Amino acid sequence: MKNADKLFERAVLIVDDEATNRAMLANILEGEYKIFQAADGREALDIIRDKNNGVSLVLLDLLMPNMSGFDVLRQMKEEGISAELPIIVLTSEKSSEIESLKLGAADFLTKPYDLPEVILARVRHAIELFENSKIIRATEYDKLTGLFTPEFFFEFAERLDERSPQKAMDALVIDLARFHLLNQLNGRDFGDKVLKAMADGIRAALQKHGGIAARYGADVFYVYSSCGKDYSAFLKEIDAALSSLLKSTEKRVRVGAFLDESRALPLVERFDRALHACNSLRSKSGEELCVYDQSMAEKALFDARLLKDFESAIEQKQFKVNYQPKFDIRGEKPVLRSAEALVCWIHPELGRVRPDLFIPLFEENGLVTILDRYVWEESAKQIKKWKDEFGVTLPVSVNVSRVDMAAPDMTSFIQKIVKENGLSPADYMLEITESAYTDDTSHIIEVVENLRALGHKVEMDDFGSGYSSLNMLTSMPIDALKMDKAFIRNIKPGNKDMKLVELVLEIAKSLEVPVVAEGVETEEEYKMLKEAGCDIIQGYYFSKPIPPEEFKKYWGAA
């Protein structure tokens, strides 16, 4: 215990030009505190500035030659030291108290001094009060940005509501698009500079509109302000603060806003809606601001219904797996080569629910892995069923999400269902979206290489919709490129879109992998792609995704 007491021993600096006064105070305090002594202001400042001394409190005489206690207080205030260290002034003049308080003093000891017990109690109280205050300040403010922490932010926001119940306040959520990539490319120190700059921009906007702000997550900021829907000020100030750090193409700041003039909703719910609005901008290229409105409220209710019904939908097999054929068009006649398994939801009350309405939702909420594994199992069973019924094995590809790739048992799960249905791994193909490769490249490559070593074919899905570079593409272990349908949508003979398609085909040729063009809808698109050297086509030109029982009409083309 003695060593522990020594570790947390506090030090008191006694500053007085009278040696007798210093000795008397030291005698009272030395049983509980380590004692430093200074005979004048300059010596005192040298001791205070030496952080290794660990001074916890200063007893400061005001009337000293050379440098008075007032001069010491002024210097400490100028250097910001008085905000970090409690000071008890030693004085026989009551008139000095007000000026001392203005300069940062915490308490007074009046000469002639009180009883030793009183002096010791006041020193102890001043140190404890200051240390408690420092602990509170440490939890009140985010260390990096100086903005409020989330807990104190909501506490102060509640107080603002209580003081001004009639004042309209905006709940804003602000973040920076692709911040995690900036961190990965430039390092954490650079990322911290970006966050500090964003906080500076927010503070500048708050000086105009009033309000408070907090850093709520890695790059997420909460703002409670009476800006009256003038959100452009925040975008403008943050953009200016980031201009010395980021290029214009890197500065995509997003603001989600919710205004509740009636204060009908609790604060947390208001910010939940602002966050929902901010998150919706991820899928809206180029847009910087989204205000939560009735349509978003309706979507939130719809999403909540889907999440609530998910478990029963899995149990009751409301999710139906359809199959879209893929045709090899390199010969004179198109030949059926494989199919892609695609899921839809036949809800007993809502009817047919489109995949684009529920798959992103399930990805956000971690349910997509359950859904994907359901589809994987159903697809494996269907390959076996077709083989037993028609004597033909049709390879089927299933989609694998970024969330799936992170699961440690993904490979063993696929092995299990392939073995249970007596399939060859080559007949069970996997489509992994291009953007998944950029999340954790080394891990993804390792998983894909293991799957390919087992005999599975792996296709890079949605190629061209993500951010993978050509250099990265050369290191990707893949068996085919699936060209995103956005490439196909506007192709015409000789136009830029068609030239881009031809470039993709050249890249794939140099990598010695076939190209699957998805989303092909017209005969003109089919002919242009065939002439350009595309290998495989998938899309409404041949067939929409259809139930397995309808697929038998294509067996003659296999």
Image (cartoon, rainbow, N blue to C red):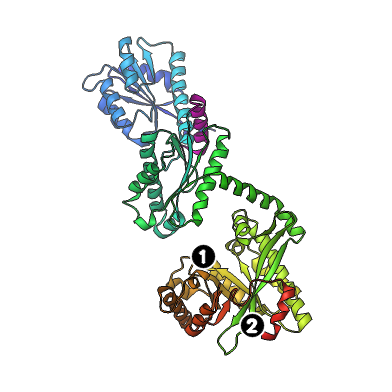
- Vertically, is 336 above or below 402? below
Q: Position of residue 13 (x, y in %)?
A: 36, 25
Magenta span: helix, strand or loop, mainly? helix
Q: Position of residue 237 (x, y in %)?
A: 35, 44
Count residues near mark 1 (Cα–Cα under 10 Å), then give few for <14, some for 14-19, many for 20+.
Answer: many
- Vertically, is 75 above or below 108? below
**Quadrant into which the C terminus falls:** bottom right
- Nearer to me, 82 or 402: 402
Give the number of the disc on residue 336.
2
Under tag 1, what secondary structure?
helix
Q: Position of residue 324 (x, y in %)?
A: 64, 73
Residue farthest along the bottom direction in this orientation: 332
Q: Residue at x 65, y 61 (%)?
A: 369
Report whether 81 appears left or right of 508: left
- Nearer to me, 522 or 448: 522
Q: Residue at x 65, y 66 (%)?
A: 410
> If you read the primary sequence from the N terminus, does the residue marked by circle 2 or circle 1 appear first?
2
Residue 355 within the segment the image draws in magenta: no
Q: Amino acid at mark 2?
A: Leu
Under tag 2, what secondary structure?
strand
Q: Amino acid at mark 1?
A: Ser
For the residues labelled 2 and 1, the Cα–Cα distance comes to: 28 Å
Give the number of the disc on residue 435.
1
